[in-house]
């Protein structure tokens, strides 16, 4: 049985388990299912890149990491990943920085990842590359002669073509997507956005899930990510969750708790959310002493200027709200800058009558799913969810809002607080059913199954070298859209997935 080889920018260290963020929690759960390797950056920086690999095990997973050098950290991580692609893919072209050296650092690190990973791959491995840090990795692996299955999953949104084309290297980045056998997105809307670019800008073709452009084809499909639902349901009933619930409940005697849990990121719509809450207090002065809004917002990417400005803005708004409505024994909101254990978070969610998840743009948003999983079945809270979170495509029984409109947000908070128990239970049961049905294991299984099939479809194509020229030139129709039936009998299917004459010729430097 082949291994699942997961590649992501960061690999969570074992001791981070309780505090790991959305992606690493999901990957750890996904990797539990069988023989697996997890490859990525160690999180360490060195003055000069050596290519040395570190290996250890987390549970049954072989973890292989490498260190990045300072220039990589600045250009690839802080630069292209977090200052170029992150804002662009979250539709914030106003914040996107298109400095050229960032792109060079991004290309360099992806090449280094590929050079370190390729020799470790076995013929029947399924390689699953994750997220915007590593879009060109598949193409680099192909250039090194890797012809086995490689799939890619984008955890953040794919932007509309008009925005994507503001990126000077848009054609090259889109071309890199065609080195994969399968590209996965969080939502059908993201698949459409990518396909729109392919058909309009790259003069490619779409036929159902098959996309052809840049002389190659790939399969594009939505795989909405989920949480580890059984684990979260267990956590919500744990002693630690109960203690957190007790603390929250003590705080909320005679008050309804409203909670938001987000990294302090401009995609999360925190200023807009605070304005919505402020509007709610203005419209319902009688409610001022009857609610407590707890916003948990740990700082993130503190080295990036836009994040410092956001932090100042959020604190100023929270200060204004409390300065307007607080009394000696009461403040309407609390803004907390720290991380909590996952079990504690579950208790906090459970104590909250309203869960506010109102990003301006979000690939999926796992907090929405965790909030639902943590609720008390007899007295569940209400999820208020932005229409711009990927989760809104699935979680239609939440109260769906436009987070840009403070009045709409304020009305939703009012309606959620007044919602009768029967209606809360009805909505929650349907939401929970979805959270349990589409959990992280299903996400993993669906992707891996689709990658296995996609690979068979593309077997003859993978024999061909990656073309350097851009963009355009479609595949001949019969090759691009040959039906995904049984795989042709190829020597490659029986033999080595890594046939690396080019790789050897390159001599690794
Ligand atoms: P993103 O990946 O953009 O941060 P998600 O909502 O998809 O957003 O995932 C965030 C994850 O991080 C969730 O699993 C959530 O429980 C976790 N998280 C967010 N804030 C905190 C916090 N203060 N303490 C602990 N975990 C947190």
Image (spheres, rainbow, N blue to C red):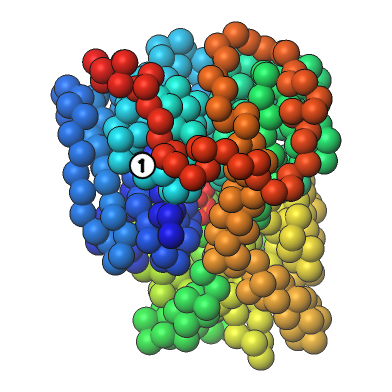
In this picture, is 140 found above or below 391? above
Give the quadrant of the N terminus: bottom left
Q: Is residue 433 toward the left or the right of residue 173 in the image?
A: right
Please provide percent x and percent y for residue 337.
39, 54
Q: Is residue 51 toward the left or the right of residue 373 in the image?
A: left
Give the SS element for disc 1. loop
**Quarter of image, res 31:** bottom left
Q: Is residue 402 toward the left or the right of residue 303 in the image?
A: right
In this picture, is 268 found above or below 94? below
Q: Is residue 168 toward the left or the right of residue 399 in the image?
A: left
Which residue is at a point 51% across and 59% down the rendered structure image? 261
Please provide percent x and percent y for residue 481.
78, 33
- Who is closer to the viewer here, 98 or 358? 98
Q: Which residue is mark 1?
A: 121
- Who is closer to the viewer here, 169 or 125? 125
In this picture, is 199 found above or below 146? above
In this picture, is 153 found above or below 201? below
**Quarter of image, res 368:** bottom right
């Amino acid at each position: 049985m082949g291994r699942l080889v997961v590649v992501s920018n960061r690999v969570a260290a074992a001791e981070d388990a309780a505090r790991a963020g959305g992606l690493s929690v999901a990957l750890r759960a996904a990797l539990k299912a069988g023989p697996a390797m997890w490859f990525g950056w160690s999180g360490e920086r060195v003055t000069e890149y050596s290519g040395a690999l570190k290996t250890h095990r987390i549970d049954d997973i072989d973890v292989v990491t490498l260190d990045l050098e300072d220039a990589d950290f600045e250009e690839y991580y802080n630069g292209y990943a977090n200052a170029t692609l992150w804002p662009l893919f979250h539709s914030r072209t106003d914040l996107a920085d298109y400095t050229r050296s960032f792109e060079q650092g991004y290309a360099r690190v992806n090449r280094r990842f590929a050079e370190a990973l390729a020799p470790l791959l076995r013929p029947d491995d399924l390689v699953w590359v994750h997220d915007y840090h590593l879009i060109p990795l598949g193409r680099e692996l192909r250039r090194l002669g890797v012809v086995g299955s490689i799939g890619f999953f984008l955890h953040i949104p794919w932007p509309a073509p008009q925005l994507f084309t503001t990126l000077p290297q848009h054609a090259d980045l889109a071309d890199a997507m065609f080195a994969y056998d399968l590209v996965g997105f969080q939502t059908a809307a993201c698949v459409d956005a990518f396909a729109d670019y392919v058909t309009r800008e790259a003069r490619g073709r779409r036929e159902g899930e098959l996309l052809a452009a840049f002389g190659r084809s790939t399969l594009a499909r939505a795989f909405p990510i989920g949480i580890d639902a059984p684990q979260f349901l267990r956590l919500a009933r744990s002693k630690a969750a109960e203690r957190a619930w007790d603390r929250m409940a003590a705080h909320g005697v005679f008050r309804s708790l409203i909670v938001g849990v987000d990294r302090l990121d401009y995609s999360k719509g925190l200023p807009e959310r605070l304005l919505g809450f402020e509007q709610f207090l203005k419209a319902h002065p009688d409610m001022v002493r009857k609610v407590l809004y707890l916003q948990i917002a740990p700082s993130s990417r503190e080295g990036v200027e836009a994040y410092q400005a956001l932090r100042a803005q959020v604190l100023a708004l929270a200060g204004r709200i409390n300065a307007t409505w607080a009394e000696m024994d009461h403040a309407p909101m609390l803004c907390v800058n720290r991380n909590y254990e996952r079990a504690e978070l579950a208790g906090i969610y459970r104590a909250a009558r309203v869960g506010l998840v109102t990003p301006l743009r979000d690939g999926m948003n796992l907090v929405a799913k965790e909030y639902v999983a943590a609720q008390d079945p007899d007295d569940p809270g209400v999820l208020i969810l932005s229409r711009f979170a990927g989760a809104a495509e699935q979680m239609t029984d939440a109260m769906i809002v436009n987070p840009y409109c403070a009045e709409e947000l304020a009305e939703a908070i009012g309606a959620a607080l007044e919602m009768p128990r029967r209606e809360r239970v009805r909505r929650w049961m349907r939401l929970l059913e979805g959270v349990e049905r589409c959990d992280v294991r299903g996400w993993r299984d669906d992707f891996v199954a689709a990658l296995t099939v996609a690979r068979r479809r593309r077997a003859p194509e993978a024999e061909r070298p990656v073309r350097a020229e851009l963009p355009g030139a479609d595949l001949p129709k019969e090759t691009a859209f040959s039906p995904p039936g049984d795989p042709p009998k190829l020597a490659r299917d029986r033999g080595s997935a890594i046939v690396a004459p080019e790789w050897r010729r390159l001599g690794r430097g």
